[in-house]
Amino acid sequence: MTYLELMDTIWAMSKKLIGRSILFGVAAVSMGLLLYQVPAINQRLSWRLDIAMTYLRGVINPVEALPTPKVESHSISITATPLPTAIPTATATKVAIPTNDSTNIPTPSPTASATPLPEKIDLEAKGWEQQDWNNCGPAALSGYLLFYGWEGNQFDISNLIKPVRQDRNVNMEELAHFARNYAGWLNTQYRVGGDIDLLKQFVAAEIPVLIEASFFFEGAYWPNDDLWAAHYLLITGYDEARGTFTVQDTYRGPDRELEYATVDEYWQPFNRLYMLIYLPHQEETVQKILGLAWDEQVNRELAIEAAQAEIDANPEDAYAWFNLGTNLLWFERYEEAAQAYDNARTYGLPQRMLRYQFGPFFAYFHSGRNDDLLTLTGYALQRTPNSEEALLWHGWGLYRSGDINGAVAEFNAALEANRFYLDAQYALDFVLNQ
């Protein structure tokens, strides 16, 4: 065999080997994709793949701090109407609060219990459930409803309010909506501006309380991760001697103890938001414990006062400023809310803050600050690309700037993230019908 014939033979064999390797690789990838569609395998692998992609995205596009406003921080003069002195008997209709009344807000507290609270209460948690990936809200609500004999689990809830497993956030409003529509034999309320004594009063009345609170990851999801996130906790007991609450934590386990001070610290970034689910005959008890806060409008006025008091004590308290903005927003006082959010951004907020709370989007949109809206929604989407809320408001920002096609693309992406997201459907219909 000549040298040329030998080289031809080697080349032919090499082509066969390369061809077989390519075919093997294609077959392996195809098989992997097919296996990935198997629910049990997808359940185990999808979150790992998502974590890897999240970290890679953080390497390619490094995470920076949440953008600060271009304007300097400043104080805000808050005005409000006087609060009623009698406890309302029904929830008032939400109305805008006049801003030309300088009367100081009184400082009533919820009606005190007729008898001293017991030193220790432990309500039986009948349905603790280990949460699925990104599913603390549905899992916590499931545990709450099971306390009253509801029959279901976290997936009965998540399939309706977050059908996409990668959806990282469920709002308290969505949880309340499910409870009212699928456990309608129970009463459901949520309020803001709670405190430690209020939590104890409800637990002593045999009503667990669901709160949204801070959570800290053990490991980073991207370089320079601040590890802060949100989590739902169901409070089912307290111990005065130990100064602790008993909480049902769908991530870390049932019947965990947290100190009162820790609960309050973790609760503050979420406006001390809490939800109550209770039997109809407990309505009067709930009204008495809430006192003036039974009225939603008064509840928000009290929350404004509480946030302002924390700001007075510490003018650089970013969470207090953020809460002030959120409560002003409830009254559609958009410019004041935007100023409060400016201060919160100035003093520093966690990287994932806008994954869970969207008040700044409303405030900047309605006060005509489109550049701030696009800046913050862009940052939020860098952190959470499938956030339907950030996609919606980024779309509105694009619409305001004249980019109709970009807006439509964002609204469609929001619907892909959550096909039940009515705000995105409305936005899409509005823009396409112009």
Image (cartoon, grey):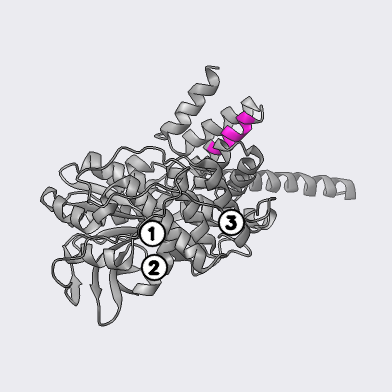
> Furthest-right residue in view?
3
In the picture, the disc for residue 428 is none
In the image, is residue 398 part of the stretch drawn in magenta?
yes
Residue 367 pos. (x, y %): 58, 38
Mark whose residue sits in front, 1 or 3:
3
Q: Residue at x 56, y 53 (%)?
A: 76
Q: Secondary structure at mark 1?
A: loop
Q: Secondary structure at mark 3?
A: loop
| Structural crowding at the residue carrying mark 3, measured as other residues with C-alpha within 10 Å and reported as few (<14), some (14–19) or many (≥20) | few
Q: Which residue is mark 1?
A: 272
| Structural crowding at the residue carrying mark 1, measured as other residues with C-alpha within 10 Å and reported as few (<14), some (14–19) or many (≥20) | many
Residue type at mark 2: give it. Answer: Asp
Q: Which residue is mark 3?
A: 75
Q: Is residue 116 above or below residue 155?
A: below
Q: Secondary structure at mark 2?
A: helix
Spatial distance from mark 3 to mark 2, Cα to Cα? 25 Å
Please report the bounds of the magenta region as a residue range.
393-400
Q: Main secondary structure of the magenta part?
A: helix
* Residue 23 visible (yes or no): no
Spatial distance from mark 2 to mark 1, Cα to Cα? 8 Å
> Furthest-top residue in view?
433
In the image, is residue 377 part of the stretch drawn in magenta?
no
Q: Residue at x 66, y 40 (%)?
A: 371
Residue 81 pos. (x, y %): 39, 46
